[in-house]
Image (spheres, rainbow, N blue to C red):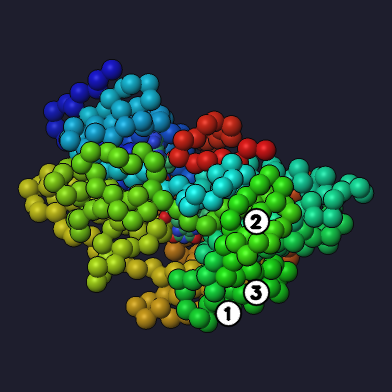
Amino acid sequence: MNEQAQDGPHVVVLGGGLGGVACAHRLGDEGVRVTLVDRNDYHQFQPLLYQVATAQLPAEDIARPHRTIFREHPTVEVRTAEVAQIDADGLSLTLTDGTRITGSHLVVAAGARPEYFGVPGAAEHAFALYSVADAERLRLHVQSLVRTGAEPDADEGELDIVVVGGGPTGVEIAGALTELMAALAATERIPRPGRITLVDRGDALLGAFSDKSHEYAHERLTEQGAEPRLGTGVSAVHADRVEFDDGSSIRTRTVIWGGGESAASVVADVPGLPTGRGGRVDVLPDLTVEGHPHVYAVGDVANIPGKDGTILPQLGSVAQQSGAWAAANILRELHGDKAKPFHYKDKGIMAMIGRNAAVAEVGRHRHQVEGPVAFAAWLGVHAMLLSGAHSRTDAFLSWAWDYFDRDHAATVEWETRPERIAWGDESADVPHIVLDRGDPTVAARRD
Ligand SMILES: Cc1cc2nc3c(=O)[nH]c(=O)nc-3n(C[C@H](O)[C@H](O)[C@H](O)COP(=O)(O)OP(=O)(O)OC[C@H]3O[C@@H](n4cnc5c(N)ncnc54)[C@H](O)[C@@H]3O)c2cc1C
């Protein structure tokens, strides 16, 4: 079926993450017709995935229905569908049911997927942490291990976990899991905490940060009981163990992959979409694709030029700002003005290493802060990111301060429902989270 372009501007957006939502919002504010296509009927907030995986937040708190987000934007139509093909020349998307949606402009905001670098068994046996469904799968898996680990005849290493990748994702999930294990052991729900090993090829955790932050992350994680193992690569992942390139191995049924990412598979081999590092779409400074002035790529799916020939990192604030900027450039064009090169307002880099432990590097000179000050910086940036999907950022702020401060042992809600953020949503605003759907861009772990 062909859905022909109608008269007037019609922007087709692929992806309803931080980039796509920011773009559609800005255009919807101006009454421009938009069709936003995403395989999920909800927007997912990746920075809080580890909170879902460790049962600190229910999944629906970080998955907001697109229809709710755009309730006040009548010109934004949301389509829940898998995009099979992009046609950059024809400014259209083809869905898996054959429907073709054609616009006057195309914005590709399809995000990223885990990159396993060809490590045998990693795609089959490791848990990714890219989507709400991934986080739920990991939570359910650990929950079932906690049950078997609590049995008197359980294997000693039943609860041992290996996290691959010492960047912010690996550090954050390792910190949260170590706290979870300690809390479960302190409340006698498991006989002893599982060992959490954090493996990275490099010689420091949080490689993109300063030496001071490397040390802080290392110290805090070690204090919490995690075991960083640096200078070590993973050579294979099996259902019951992980092998390293120094010939050693660890017995484990839980390997979590935070070891790298590449662009969503839908942008691979698309005529007219040049791809470079990480399989991402190379864009010009104004976020359009060379030779295609009406095709934009934003967020994690794009190699966006920064200052001095650098490529901007795959961060929420880059995605949100580039999505809004692409919309602003489309609006400029509609008003007869020239598109402007994207200017990124750098919010710094930051990571939460557990309750009471956070590190941030902010400002032009990357000023390093730790503890509550770093957490406050983290909170400001993340409240801003969430504001695209939620109007009640105050609810997030009060939940987050409470989380940062409170005593963990008392609050691990493993068997019952975790405390919710008081979003004040209506009961009809429920995302449809499907765990077992074959997802072509995210290789889910199969037990
Ligand atoms: C675990 C984790 C923690 C993170 N923590 C932080 C943090 O603390 N701070 C920070 O700034 N950044 C963080 N990031 C990075 C940040 O979340 C991303 O940079 C940001 O979400 C990218 O936004 P995006 O819109 O480009 O892509 P996404 O948010 O990934 O959205 C892409 C959308 O496209 C859809 N899609 C893809 N392919 C198709 C298809 N073929 N058909 C239909 N729909 C499709 C997907 O369903 C998805 O909704 C984290 C990332 C992860 C994975």
The residue that label 2 is drawn on is 243
Q: Amino acid at mark 3?
A: Arg
Q: Amino acid at mark 1?
A: Glu
Look at discs 2 and 3 and give the one toward the viewer.
Answer: 2
Mark 1 and mark 3 lie on one chain; the one further toward the N terminus is 1
Q: Secondary structure at mark 1?
A: helix
* Cα separation between marks 1 and 2: 27 Å
Identify the residue at horizontal 40%, vertical 78% (top origin).
Answer: 366
Is residue 315 something one can see in this rendering? yes
Identify the residue at horizontal 75%, vertical 49% (top origin).
Answer: 414
User: Where is residue 358 shown, x and y percent of the image?
Assistant: 57, 71
Q: Quadrant of residue 60?
A: top right
> What label sits on residue 220 in the rendered view?
3
Q: Alpha-carbon neighbours of circle 2 within 10 Å: few (<14), some, or many (≥20)? A: some
> What label sits on residue 215 in the rendered view?
1
In the rendered image, the vertical position of residue 388 relative to residue 428, given as above or below: below
User: Where is residue 333 shown, x and y percent of the image?
Assistant: 12, 47
Taking depth in this image into account, of 436 and 413 the one nearest to the observer is: 436
Mark 2 and mark 3 lie on one chain; the one further toward the N terminus is 3
Query: Seen from this angle, which residue lies furthest right?
Result: 152
In the rendered image, the vertical position of residue 236 relative to residue 247, given as above or below: above
Please state, as top left, top right, bottom left or bottom right, where the C terminus lies in the image. Answer: top right
Q: Quadrant of residue 437?
A: top right
* Cα separation between marks 2 and 3: 26 Å
In the rendered image, the vertical position of residue 240 relative to residue 372, given as above or below: above
Q: Secondary structure at mark 3?
A: helix
Mark 1 and mark 2 lie on one chain; the one further toward the N terminus is 1
CB of mark 1 within 8 Å of CB of mark 3? no
Look at discs 1 and 3 and give the one toward the viewer.
Answer: 1
Please state, as top left, top right, bottom left or bottom right, where the N terminus lies in the image. Answer: top left
Report whether 52 appears left or right of 391.
Answer: right
